[in-house]
Image (cartoon, rainbow, N blue to C red):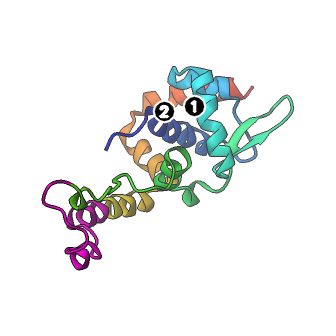
Amino acid sequence: MKLGSGVEWSIHCLALLGALPPGRSLRLEKLAEFHNLKVAYLRKHFQALSKAGLVATVTGPQGGYRLGRSSDKISLLDIYIALEGDDHCFRCTEIRQDGPCANPALDKPSYSIPCNIAVSMWKAEDAWRKELAKVSIADVLGATAKQVSSEKMERMAQWLTEALA
């Protein structure tokens, strides 16, 4: 499975929004600047995140984006689904029913049982989704605080202060 880069970018951006002081928002241009991303590409993803209720827009001179709900209520799975959709990654096309050895009329009972390959793939995807659902933006922020040096935290705080001014 290969995810689009927008999933990674959006998780980082939502984590940054989760670090904002209450009642504050950040312009998309500033989010893009912080991560050295292209605004146009990020805008496309934020439209999907907004539609899913994960971010909200604030209008006016202090406008921009903020989280659409509490950081502990936004999971990595929510972000993935908002951007990539909720369909299964693996799509079984039932090729076992095709080819020179297939005889759907005679093998009907075996074809009524889901393909064991598809079942295995779906189980793996379900496990992956359950893991993503366990991790919230608040969890990402907590882990980041443990991984980042105090100097970098100070630089980030200074950048945010200037970006919000």
Residue drawn 20% across the image and 75% down it: 106
Please tell me whether mark 2 sits on a helix, a strand or a loop. Answer: helix
Residue drawn 44% across the image and 43% down it: 145
Query: Which residue is label 1 attached to?
Result: 157
Picture coordinates of residue 117, whole percent (x, y):
21, 62
Is 127 placed left or right of 26 in the picture? left
Q: In the rendered structure, does residue 106 fall within the stretch colored magenta?
A: yes
Query: Which residue is label 2 attached to?
Result: 153
- Magenta region: 99-124
Picture coordinates of residue 135, whole percent (x, y):
43, 57
The amino acid beneath tag 2 is Met
Is 163 placed left or right of 10 in the picture? right
Please tell me whether mark 1 sits on a helix, a strand or a loop. Answer: helix
Picture coordinates of residue 149, whole percent (x, y):
39, 33
Among the 4 quarters of the image, the one containing residue 56: top right
The amino acid beneath tag 1 is Ala
Position of residue 77 relative to residue 116, above or below, is above
Whether residue 10 appears in this view of the structure is yes
Q: In the rendered structure, does residue 123 fall within the stretch colored magenta?
A: yes
Residue drawn 49% across the image and 42% down it: 11
**Quarter of the image containing the C terminus?**
top right
Is 96 placed left or right of 6 in the picture? left
Residue drawn 31% across the image and 63% down it: 122
Crowd rating for badge 2 (residues with CA inside 10 Å; few <14, some 14–19, many 20+): some
Confirm or deny contact between disc 1 and disc 2 (CB under 8 A): yes
